[in-house]
Amino acid sequence: MRKSFFWFCSILMLASYFWVNSFSSTHAMHIAEGFLPIKWVIIWWIAFLPFLFIGILQLRKLFRNSPEMKMVLGLSTAFAFVLSALKIPSVTGSSSHPTGLGFGTILFGPMIMSVVGFVVLLFQSLLLAHGGITTLGANAFSMAVLGPFVAYGVYKASKKMNVHHNVSIFLAAALANLATYVATSFQLALAFPDSVNGIIGSFMKFASIFAITQIPLSIVEGLLTVMVLNFLAKYNREELSTLNVQMKEAK
C-alpha cells in the first residue's frame, strides 16, 4: 500500500512539473498550448466529450465480454503513443506527426479509439511536456474522432470493393492521418480567418503548409501499419478472430 502510494505521488509530482512547464511554447501538439481563443477551446471540448463518453461505454463492454483483448488494445495504444510523439514543427502554433490510430481503428472501431487517442494526447501533455491541455478538446476531436472515423469508413468501403487487404489497411491508416490535419487546418481557419478571403482562404493557407510534411508522413504511417497488422495477425490469429478482423494475408 505504501509502495503504491509512493509511486502514485511520484507520478503525480512529475506530471504536475511537466504540466506547469508545458505552458512554454513547445508547439508539440496539432494545436499548441494556449493557441486557440477560449471560445473555440470550449466548443471543441463540447464537440469531443460525447464521443469520449460513448467510447468509454464500448470499452467497458469490450473488457467485460473479452478481457483477453486488453493486451491487443495496449499494443494499439502504445503504437499510437510512440508514433504521435514524433513531432515535426510545422505552422506556427502547431506540429506535424503520425497519429497511429488507424491501426487500432481497424481492430476495435472508431469509438473506442476516441478513448485511446484522448489518453495518448493527455499522457503526452502531462508526462512528455508537450503542452496542449487547453487545446486538448480540439486536438482530440481531430485526431481521436475524425481520423478514426475516416479510417473505419475507408477500410470498410475498401473491403466491400474487394480491394487487396494490405491496400485497404494502407489507405485507412494514411487517409486517417491526412484527415486529422485537414481537420486541424479547418479548426485553425475557423479561429483565425483570413482578413481578405475569410475561413476558406485561411484554410487553404494552413492546409497547403501542412501538406508538405503530412503527405510523406501519412504514406510512411500507412506502410508501417500494414507491416505491424500483418505481424500481429501472424501471431495473434485467435484474438483477431474474436474481433472479427479478417487478416487473410498472414500465414
Image (cartoon, rainbow, N blue to C red):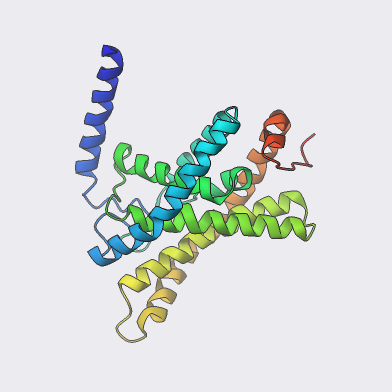
In this rendering, is residue 243 above or below 24? above
Please identify the quadrant where the N terminus is shown: top left
In this rendering, is residue 217 above or below 182? above
Residue 213, image x and y in percent? 48, 59
Q: State left or right for residue 71 relative to residue 230.
A: left
In this rendering, is residue 53 above or below 94? above
Please identify the quadrant where the C terminus is shown: top right
Q: Quadrant of residue 191?
A: bottom left
Q: Residue at x 61, y 51 (%)?
A: 222
Res. 146 in view: yes
Res. 92 in view: no
Q: Residue at x 26, y 35 (%)?
A: 15
Residue 224, image x and y in percent? 61, 44
Total number of numbered discs in the rendering: 0
Residue 239, image x and y in percent? 67, 31
Q: Residue at x 26, y 66 (%)?
A: 39
Q: Quadrant of residue 190?
A: bottom left
Q: State left or right for residue 213 relative to residue 5.
A: right
Q: Residue furthest bottom?
A: 196
Q: Nearer the viewer, residue 237 or 53?
A: 53
Q: Nearer the viewer, residue 198 or 59?
A: 59
Q: Nearer the viewer, residue 179 or 245?
A: 245
Q: Residue at x 65, y 59 (%)?
A: 154
Residue 20, image x and y in percent? 19, 42
